[in-house]
Amino acid sequence: MSGYLDKPQSHESSDAKARRKLLDQRRMEYRRAIESYAEQRQLQQQLVDYPELIAANYLAGTQALARRNAQPGR
């Protein structure tokens, strides 16, 4: 009889574990997003002192994009 009573409890505990795991995953995603945002802000603040680097990176990025979007000649 005790085996019969243990089965519903194990099902309930597995549901609770699944909910906790999902909640932990969401928390970690949120934490990573906050850390990424903070790192981006810090990098932007550091780059403010060097506007020529910003312009150079922008130009390099647009040139790379233009090369990727260019149609190959036939």
Image: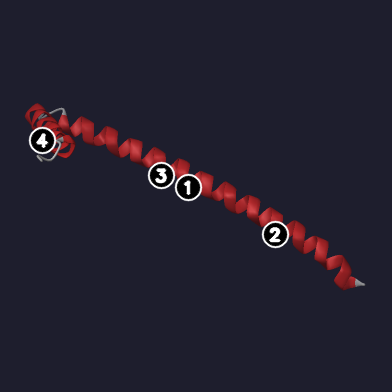
Q: State the residue in front, 74 or 41.
A: 74
Q: Is residue 57 above or below residue 12?
A: above
In front: mark 2 or mark 1? 2
Cα separation, mark 4 vs mark 3, equals: 28 Å
**Residue matched to label 2:** 14
The residue sitting at 86% across, 72% down in the picture is: 3
- Mark 1 touching mark 3, by CB under 8 A? yes
* Relative horizontal placement of residue 2, taking residue 17 as reference (left or right): right
Q: CA distance from mark 1 to mark 3?
A: 6 Å
- Using the image as rendered, state which of residue 46 and residue 10 is in the foreground: 10
Residue carrying label 1: 28
Q: Quadrant of residue 61?
A: top left
Helix, strand or loop at disc 4? helix
Q: Nearer the viewer, mark 4 or mark 3?
A: 4
Q: What is the quadrant of the C terminus in the image?
A: top left
* Amino acid type for the residue under numbered disc 2: Ser
In this figure, which residue is indicated by the disc labeled 3?
32
Residue 56 x, y percent position in the rendering: 8, 32
For image coordinates 10% across by 27% down, the residue present is 51
